[in-house]
Image (cartoon, rainbow, N blue to C red):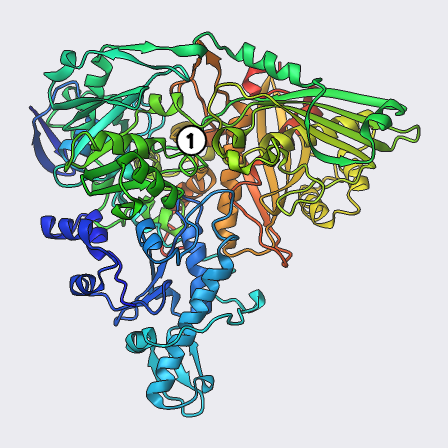
Amino acid sequence: MARLTINGQIRDVEVDPDTPLLWVIREQVGLTGTKFGCGIAQCGACTVHIDGVATRSCALPVSAVGDDQKIVTIEGLSPDGSHPVQRAWLALDVPQCGYCQSGMIMASAALLQQNPKPSDDDISAEITNICRCGTYPKVRAAIHMAAEGGATKQAG
Amino acid sequence: MTYQPNVSRRAFIAGSAAAIGGFTLGFHVPFADAAMAQGASALPPEVNAWVVVKPDETVIIRIARSEMGQGTLTGLAQLVAEELECDWSKVTTEYPTPGENLARNRVWGSYSTGGSRGIRDSESYVRQGGAAAREMLIAAAAAQWKVPAGDCKAAKGVITHTASGRTTTFGKVADAAAAQTPPINIKLKDPKDWTIAGKPLPRLDTADKLTGKQIYGADLRLPGMLVATIKACPVFGGKVASFDAAAVAGKPGVRKVVQVDDNAVAVVADTWWQAKTALDALPITWDEGPNKNLSSADIAGTLAAGLDAPDAFVGNKQGDAKAALAGAAKTVTATYSFPYLNHATMEPMNATALYTADKCEVWVPTQNGEASLAVAAEAAGLPVQKCDVHKLLLGGGFGRRGNFQDYVRQAVLIAKQMPGTPVKLLWSREEDMLHGAYHPITQAKLTGGFDAQGNLTVFHMRISGQSILAAVRPEGMQGGMDPVVFQGLTANSPEGHMGYTIPNVLVDHAMRNPPIPPGFWRGVNLNQNTLYMECFMDELAHAAGVDPLAFRRKLMANHPKHRGVLEAVAARIDWDKPAPAGVHRGIAHTMGFGSYVAAAAEVSVDKGQLKIHRIVAATDAGHAVNPAQIERQVEGSFVYGLSACLYGECTVKGGRMEQENFDTYEVLRLAEMPAVETIVMPSGGFWGGVGEPTIAVAAPAVLNALFAATGKRIRTLPLKNHPLA
């Protein structure tokens, strides 16, 4: 049994304490926006926020997360996709296949929370998620756009 | 014809259907049974196979090819909408199932989405589909008004009778339009008149990818569904000797331990993590079979022996290369190699299957729904008419999910052992890395010969290595030869021919097929062929003491489109002016998948560290359906191509791959990604592909720049194995 606070809701889940947080989020809680990519915290597709810090959830046992810690998943980043990072992503039409993008968006949102005007070097150091389609240039541009508060419409 | 799209299924997958009612319907709507479908759906009948218009003016465009990030869904919708003359803001899309295609005599054509063919193979008939629907909508309005259809026109979903100014909308006449006789061979619009196609429109499928709403195969949930994960013998060609199911039968959530074919074992459980935990604990004894001692060194030795073997298949022959080499004033020879690579899609392989005695349905992210259907039917042991496949968005494809449907077969074989229960099979990353359809391995020995005046008079490329077709599509072989081996190196194939005129040319292939399963890896054989060709051209230029661009130009007079893209990147990167201090340039071009592409790179090397500062790329695909998506495909091609160049290799030891995850199979990350400037330069008159060709120029442009920077000629990938300090 674990008690978690996910997207502002308290969730009691019946689960083995060694189960990675990712699988609790996906299978017990049913939020599938957070993705499985590697299982060893290498690719970042499973990134969520724990108390505001970008965290790779696929290798983190659920027992390591306290019930007072606030977990935010992609579904809880904003009620309607209006977080500045999501708006910038829409404006620059960033995703290709999109599978890694929940993790990219969560990592980027956490970066901007800590560093509202990141430099290119800051972005390079902090955004280490893997994208195989190759959205990196658009990811970088969208982080800058979100930092500048410039996203108001979709790309045309 | 009152075909109804399977709305209940779609709504169900979106997670909003009212449970079992929709579920049952989704499984059992027989699309041949029009009466039942009619009663089950609130949608209006289609105008034709490609177009449905709802009363609220929403236009549903049917897409047969798969979307895997490459933008084909949006591009094909643009082409249909262009001819349809609808309001683009009202366009949505849907996938008809492969079973529906079969039942309707393949009205949507091929579902195969590979070879950069999604748009170029189907543009003609999808545009005809849009145009026919437009004519039928106009004819319906004209009939209501009792005026000649020729006096009416359509624009943005509104039909106007020119003389009277009377108007109506697509949604109002869609029902009547469906009854019109479909016209055929309609004159399509000249691309210069396009207003929707040819424009850099945003993708249609972005919004749900930003909020977690988008459902991929790995995310699918069906009522009563169980989840499985699988382990096949890690040694290629090995089998299951035995396993002790009782050892894990009591573990939490475990429902069943099943053998799959003769080489794999799967655990079915309530959740994936339970299945994974139990599978990891399951004692399995493997019969490792004949390849258990195979190593990369063995394979390299086998290929090396082919470099000088007497017999080889000839892919391109002009003049007499052997005689010309014997008479050359100077020759240059170099040997290159290219390793095995895994596609490493971000979403591991998966498929969900529901089997009953008389029906089998599969939900799967697939590049070829019809291939999935065929494999599902075979595995189920049911007639194909009793099976269907529901395509889901792919979390990456890159060639892994087209010709190869091993995960579909496995999912059906598992589900068959649990009739009536939907089972989702999801591979671990380790399983994905150990059971790929690997980029084939080859070596090449290249020889160039100059006459006394320094002219390149002869070129010989001997390729030794693996044939994809021999392993996976033997019906494509031509008298024992695999024509795909020669991608980009042929004399005149419209798919890709060599961009140089040299009096004596021989390109031949000594086929050597190690027991490692090869596959179509984004770019396929163009990747290594272009690397060999373009790095060696640089070697020849260097040997001749001529600038690499000038050296190529001299051989390209008869190849204006090849030269066009090469000149474009050279001009943009200021090739004729000095590079910034410490920065060095390289250049490469090729033709593949019917398109002409080139790249120029600027790099520096500091304390043994390569930094790629800038890439300029040019693409001439004949037509540019969506320039913004082409730009993204080109950028992505560098990520894929540079991942291979810098890090990519799967090595064999003990008959299995050594790399099992991203810690040992490294890929390019954001920090290393250079700025890419993309020149989209469609010259018209042909339709080339976009998703793949540019990958091939990434490595040679960078390696040629690296040579300019260091004097080191890298002839084997990946670069991580070569210290630069």
Label tally = 1
The residue closer to the viewer here, B686 or B618, is B686
Q: Is residue A123 left or right of residue A114?
A: right
User: Where does residue A59 sit, x and y in percent of width and height?
Assistant: 26, 21
Picture layout, residue A6 above or below residue A155: above
Please identify the quarter of the rendering in which residue B322 is found.
Answer: top right
The residue closer to the viewer here, B591 or B316, is B316
Tell me the quarter of the image containing the C terminus of chain B.
top right
User: Which residue: 36% across, 91% down?
Assistant: B146
The answer to whether one can see residue A69 in this image is: yes
User: Where does residue B556 sit, x and y in percent of width and height?
Assistant: 77, 43
Q: Residue furthest top?
A: B293
User: Where does residue B265 sit, x and y in percent of width and height?
Assistant: 26, 20
Q: Label 1's element?
A: helix
User: Where does residue B598 sit, x and y in percent of width and height?
Assistant: 64, 41
The answer to whether one can see residue B95 in this image is: no
Tell me the quarter of the image containing the N terminus of chain B.
bottom left
The amino acid type found where label 1 is placed reads: Asp
Please identify the quarter of the rendering in which residue B326 is found.
Answer: top right
User: Which residue: 36% across, 25% down?
Assistant: B432
Picture layout, residue B573 above or below residue B607: below
Picture layout, residue B637 above or below residue B337: below
Q: Is residue B597 left or right of residue B296?
A: right
The residue closer to the viewer here, B187 or B195, is B187
The residue closer to the viewer here, A101 or B462, is B462
- Badge 1 crowding class, 10 Å Cα cut-off, few under 14, some 14 to 19, many 20 or more, is few
User: Which residue: 76% across, 37% down?
Assistant: B549
**Label 1 lies in what chain?**
A
Q: Is residue B270 left or right of residue B330?
A: left
- Residue position for label 1: A122
